[in-house]
Image: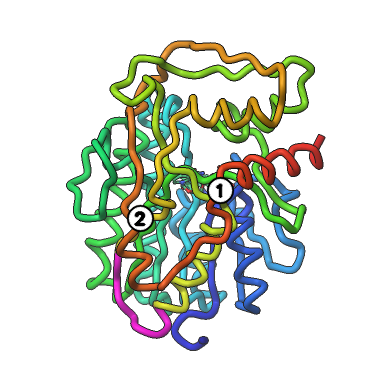
Amino acid sequence: MNKKVNKILITGGAGYIGSHVTERLLKAKLNVILLDNLSRGHRKLINKKVKFIKADTKNLNLLKKIIYKNKIKTIIHLAGYANVAESQVNKRKYFKNNILGTLNVVKACKNSNVKNIIFSSSCSIYGNVIGNVDEKKKPNPSSYYAYTKYKCENIIKKYSKKFNYKYIILRYFNVAGASSSGKIGEIKNKNARLIKNLAIQYFKSKPIININGSNYKTKDGTCIRDYIHVSDIAEIHYKCIKHLDEYSKSNIFNCGYGKGYSVLEIANIFKKMRKNTSINFVNKRPGDVGQVYANIKKFKKIFRWKPKYNNMTKILRSSIKWENKIN
Ligand SMILES: NC(=O)c1ccc[n+]([C@@H]2O[C@H](COP(=O)([O-])OP(=O)(O)OC[C@H]3O[C@@H](n4cnc5c(N)ncnc54)[C@H](O)[C@@H]3O)[C@@H](O)[C@H]2O)c1
């Protein structure tokens, strides 16, 4: 692998997923550069072996310069805000950062060496679904965050021919866990996600699990999601780069395990690991859908992929281990 892909810019490289993707690509000895404005990222997640550029995707001229000067061939675009509740009340902020930021990334590819873009989309673009969902399902975003991801997908598709790049859109389901290297993991930003919250609670003398909503139309009334370990997500990016190198073909893939867990099911698994945990039902969060989990036939078929960490106890243990390390 090399000529068509190698010189990879990861936007959002100081974030949770970006740091894991970086670790995986470095293991494959690929040439990686990180870009992040550190608005939500963390210096301690930045891999010391790579060049880091503090920059904002909202600055088109700077992006152009960085891409040109570093002869970038592949962009893994992860930079963005990702908080559903925040997006509902701060639409303008999300519009500027996620949509205009992505438009800039794409525009910066014009007349450049960039041949590939891998984009971090989200299962939230599907909206509420019954059963599992495949990539052909018409998007129906139910939060503003989801809407920004949907618009970004369209921007990336729209300019692909004009600016001469291939794309792979990855629709992540819920990413959780931490690298077994012990060096990186999720650091709490406001409104931490479920698994991260559980890891935090694990170290409290009286752990409490707050469950948002108990009357969704699901088997136990709590939300159902598909959780995927962050190291499997990182592996998927590596496989996509190899794929682009070999086939130069645009595509869209769901990234999950194809199994839905309800929040209550996860809470009960956690309770077995941490006795005297209490469960507390609180209000629904605006923009949350009842259930969504992936149909992953397409990815499995093309990549003959077998996930490594497909087990909720493993995911919880790896998050708890990381939490222990950072506290
Ligand atoms: N974590 C998940 O479960 C999940 C699920 C679906 C999609 N995603 C998407 O994956 C991407 C990465 O998510 P994450 O969980 O690592 O989040 P994160 O907040 O840890 O990482 C995002 C990074 O982007 C940076 N950033 C934000 N706006 C920027 C800008 N304008 N210019 C430069 N840098 C900017 C932040 O500082 C941060 O380091 C996001 O786009 C998110 O929407 C995440």
Q: Mark 1 points at which residue?
A: 311
**Looking at the rendering, which quadrant does residue 220 occupy?**
top left
- Crowding near the residue tagged with mark 1, few <14, some 14–19, many ≥20 C-alpha atoms within 10 Å: few
Amino acid bearing label 1: Asn
Does the segment drawn in magenta span residue 245? yes
Q: What stretch is highlighted in magenta?
A: 244-251
Q: Do the residues labelled 1 and 2 touch (CB within 8 Å)?
A: no
Q: Nearer the viewer, residue 230 or 26?
A: 230
Q: Residue 254 carries which label?
A: 2
Q: Residues under labels 1 and 2: Cα distance?
A: 18 Å
Q: Which residue is drawn at 37% across and 20% down?
A: 221
| Quadrant of the rendering where the C terminus is positioned | top right
Write the residue at 61% across / 76% down.
31
Scheme of image coloration = rainbow
Residue 286 on image: x %, y %: 37, 20
**How far from the left and from the top, in percent, is residue 62?**
51, 60
- Tell which circle, 1 or 2, labels the residue nearer the N-terminal end: 2
> Which class describes the residues within 10 Å of circle 2: few (<14), some (14-19), or many (20+)?
many
User: On screen, 84 above or below 182?
Assistant: above
Q: Where is residue 246 in the image (x, y as percent from the top left)?
A: 40, 85
Is 40 in front, or is 1?
1
Q: Which amino acid does label 2 sit on?
A: Asn
Where is residue 199 shown, x and y percent of the image? 68, 33
Task: Answer whether residue 227 is magenta in the image.
Answer: no
Residue 220 is at least partly visible in this image: yes
Q: Can see residue 35? A: no
Please give left or right for residue 19 compared with residue 232 in the image.
Answer: right
